[in-house]
Image (cartoon, rainbow, N blue to C red):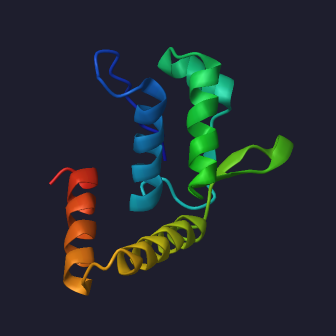
Amino acid sequence: MTLKIAVDPDSATAPYEQVRDQLSEQARSGALPVGYRLPTVRGLAGELGLAANTVAKAYRALEGDGVIETRGRNGTFVAAAGGAAERRAATAAQVYAEQARRLGLSRAEALSLAQDAVRAAYGG
């Protein structure tokens, strides 16, 4: 099992977002299994030619998303699939649904807007 991350310095996407996106995708697809130990912040930064703060920012975001978990001095690991990330998404969906209802949107209108937002976020 090897971690595969490529950062494109010419991309409009910030390097930390590229790291975040790639790690998240690999964890969610199973390419990085639950419990896989990630390199240290400094180790990964060195491999990628990035500042340690850039990788640390990606790790913090991934931890907030529930994709990875830090176990103190033991390191950083891929968290159980779903879990916290699914709970946060469900909460966000509930908040959206309540707001749409308060605004007087019909169920069909609310669903259509949500689908448009998901399509835009996922590129298609």
Residue 109 at x, y = what percent? 20, 77
Instruction: Name the foreground residue: 35 vs 63.
Output: 63
Residue 82 at x, y = what percent? 52, 70
Q: Is residue 67 above or below residue 42?
A: below
Q: What residue do we see at 79% from left, 50% from top?
A: 71
Q: Is residue 63 left or right of residue 97?
A: right
Q: Is residue 79 left or right of residue 23?
A: right
- Give the quarter of the figure containing the C terminus: bottom left
In the rendered image, the residue lying farthest to the bottom is: 107
Instruction: Name the foreground residue: 31 vs 10.
Output: 10
Q: Is residue 71 above or below residue 29?
A: above
Q: What residue do we see at 63% from left, 58% from top?
A: 35
Q: Is residue 57 left or right of residue 14?
A: right
Q: Is residue 67 left or right of residue 20?
A: right
Question: Dividing the picture into quarters, in which one does residue 112 lie?
Answer: bottom left
- Count the marks: how many? 0
Question: Dividing the picture into quarters, in which one does residue 106 lie?
Answer: bottom left
Instruction: Name the foreground residue: 39 vs 64.
Output: 64
Q: Is residue 42 above or below residue 25?
A: above
Residue 42 at x, y = what percent? 67, 23
Residue 98 at x, y = what percent? 45, 78
In the rendered image, the residue lying farthest to the left is: 124
Q: What residue do we see at 85% from left, 41% from top?
A: 73
Q: What residue do we see at 61% from left, 39% from top?
A: 59
Q: Is residue 20 above or below residue 85?
A: above
In the rendered image, the residue lying farthest to the right is: 73
